[in-house]
Amino acid sequence: MATAVDELAAVIQADGGDLVLVKADAALDRIEVRLDLDGVSCLDCILPPDQLRRVLEDGIARRVPSEFELVVHDPR
């Protein structure tokens, strides 16, 4: 899970933000991430919330074989 989040964080970091793995609970099949936009000068450069969620879900699903709940803390 952490590897998938790190790979996706690289895309966000290119625009000055970050994606942080807050918690991964295998027992509950729940992954929680936080979008950090503190260093972003162009908020429009970051994927819109719905598209970001889809990209995250698809990226994590390639690494996590079971179904999971994704919680995204997006300050926008």
Image (cartoon, rainbow, N blue to C red):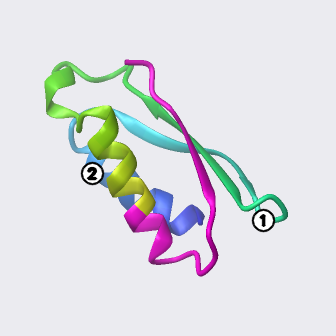
Tell which tag, 2 or 1, sits nearer the viewer: 1
Which numbered disc, 2 or 1, marks the residue that appears first in the sequence?
Answer: 2
Q: Quadrant of the N terminus?
A: bottom right
Above or below residue 25? Residue 62 is below
- Residue identified by numbered label 2: 11
Residue 26 image point, x, y percent: 78, 65
Judge whether residue 7 can be spotted in this image: yes
Residue 69 marker: none
Above or below residue 26? Residue 8 is above
Residue shown at 37%/24% (left/top)? 37
Neighbourhood count class around disc 1 (C-alpha, 10 Å): few under 14, some 14–19, many 20 upward: few
- Which image quadrant for residue 76? top left
The kind of residue on which mark 2 rests is Val
Which residue range is magenta in the image? Answer: 58-76
Instruction: Indicate left or right for 68 with 20 as reference.
Output: right
Residue 44 or 53: which is nearer the viewer? 53
The kind of residue on which mark 1 rests is Ala
Instruction: Indicate left or right for 30 with 47 as reference.
Output: right
Secondary element under disc 2, as helix, strand or loop, is: helix
Judge whether residue 13 can be spotted in this image: no
- Residue identified by numbered label 1: 26
